[in-house]
Image: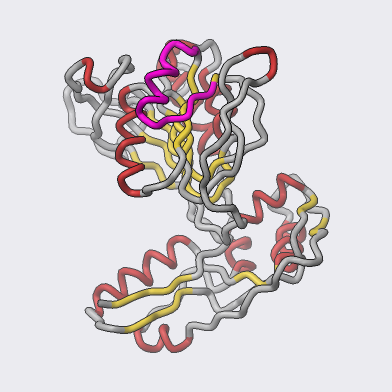
């Protein structure tokens, strides 16, 4: 068995859009109350493989009362595998079930418009919270599967949900196949053109919501730090980076070699300190915000990785040799 030990860093994948044939589950009180019906849906997906910002292990959160008696709120410590489901209907609850099977011990939160089904959510292990509840928590994994029928500003709701994502895992928005510009029983796939904005109010809503997700764009650690301006972390802590695409191509290259009993390493061989990363970001001119500073002094330093042996063994080189060259490609 080949084991790859990879350090995944702030270089993130370009936009990935998964728009396929999947189950569409109507929003019903519970998964058992009706048979599941199938249709198309599109999913707009934003993933980031970033140097993780340290988080504590998941623990049972305290569910309290938020401001203005709005209902249950999420609070406590967010774990690396915790999940926020915006619109935990049938699809959301099935996602929760599958996610918990993959990540035992994680915490799963469900954001709803009303408190009508909060007791049901608690029974199936989902911590409920009302839409609009104030929280400072951000989650590594967020899925938005609420329908547009219960809101006057669907793109705005998606934008608010995306603000609950910390950029470390994935933000997934489930949509519909309606935006595909095909209405004659013809064949349609991921590359089929979409309906132009302005032709249909229904598709406009969906496409505008998808664009909100795509506009969140690159959500690596550098984007998180930009959003904060000042971060309490040691500026000299060294990060080891690799682009999402390069991590994937290295993994495939290793699989093709059919190696056994080896430990391999994935990185770009250009380690940078946090300060160096953000200096490059500021100098790039590619971002509207400017990062101010890191203020930490006591947190531990990192390490400098080099995978020249792995490259020679596998015959692999990265598409993005350094973070600086990645920024140049934007």
* Residue 22 higher or lower than 293, as above or below: above
Residue displayed at 39% across by 32% down: 125
* Residue 256 higher or lower than 191, as above or below: below
Q: Nearer the viewer, residue 76 or 185?
A: 76
Residue displayed at 73% across by 66% down: 299
Per the image, is 116 magenta? Answer: yes
The location of residue 24, given as percent across then percent down, is 27, 26
* Residue 321 higher or lower than 278, as above or below: below
Q: Quadrant of the N terminus?
A: bottom left
Horizontally, residue 326 falls left or right of residue 280, namely left
Residue displayed at 50% across by 74% down: 267
Per the image, is 99 magenta? Answer: no
The location of residue 274, given as percent across then percent down, is 71, 65
The location of residue 133, given as percent across then percent down, is 62, 22
Part of the protein shown in magenta: 114-129
Q: Nearer the viewer, residue 21 or 204?
A: 21
Asked if residue 240 shows in the view, the reply is yes
The location of residue 39, given as percent across then percent down, is 22, 24
Q: Nearer the viewer, residue 79 or 165?
A: 79
Count of numbered labels shown in the rendering: 0
Residue 43 found in image quarter: top left
Horizontally, residue 315 falls left or right of residue 7, namely left
* Residue 283 higher or lower than 311, as above or below: above
């Amino acid at each position: 068995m080949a084991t790859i030990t990879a350090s995944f860093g702030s270089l993130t994948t370009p936009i990935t859009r998964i728009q396929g044939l999947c189950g569409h589950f109507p929003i019903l009180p519970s998964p058992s109350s009706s048979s599941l019906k199938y249709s198309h849906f599109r999913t707009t997906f934003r993933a980031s493989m970033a140097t993780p910002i340290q988080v504590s292990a998941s623990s049972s959160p305290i569910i309290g009362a938020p401001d203005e008696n709005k209902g249950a709120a999420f609070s406590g410590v967010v774990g690396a595998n915790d999940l926020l489901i915006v619109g935990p209907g049938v699809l959301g609850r099935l996602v929760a079930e599958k996610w918990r099977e993959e990540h035992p011990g994680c915490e799963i939160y469900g954001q709803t418009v009303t408190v009508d089904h909060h007791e049901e959510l608690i029974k199936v292990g989902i911590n409920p919270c009302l839409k609009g509840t104030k929280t400072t928590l951000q989650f590594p994994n967020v899925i938005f599967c609420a329908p547009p029928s219960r809101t006057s500003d669907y793109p705005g709701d998606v934008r608010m949900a995306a603000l609950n994502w910390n950029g470390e895992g994935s933000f997934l928005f489930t949509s519909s196949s309606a935006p595909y510009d095909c209405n004659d029983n013809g064949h349609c796939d991921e590359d089929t053109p979409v309906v132009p904005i302005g032709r249909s109010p229904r598709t406009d809503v969906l496409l505008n919501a998808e664009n909100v997700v795509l506009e969140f764009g690159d959500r690596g650690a550098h984007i998180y730090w930009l959003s904060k301006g000042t971060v309490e972390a040691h500026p000299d802590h060294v990060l080891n980076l690799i682009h999402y695409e390069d991590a994937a191509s290295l993994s495939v290259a290793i699989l093709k070699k059919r190696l056994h009993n080896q430990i391999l390493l994935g990185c770009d061989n250009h380690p940078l300190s946090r300060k160096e990363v953000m200096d490059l970001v500021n100098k790039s001119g590619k971002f509207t915000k400017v990062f101010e500073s890191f203020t930490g002094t006591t947190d531990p330093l990192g390490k400098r990785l080099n995978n020249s042996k792995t490259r020679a063994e596998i015959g692999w080189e990265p598409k993005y040799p350094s973070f600086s060259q990645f920024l140049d490609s934007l």
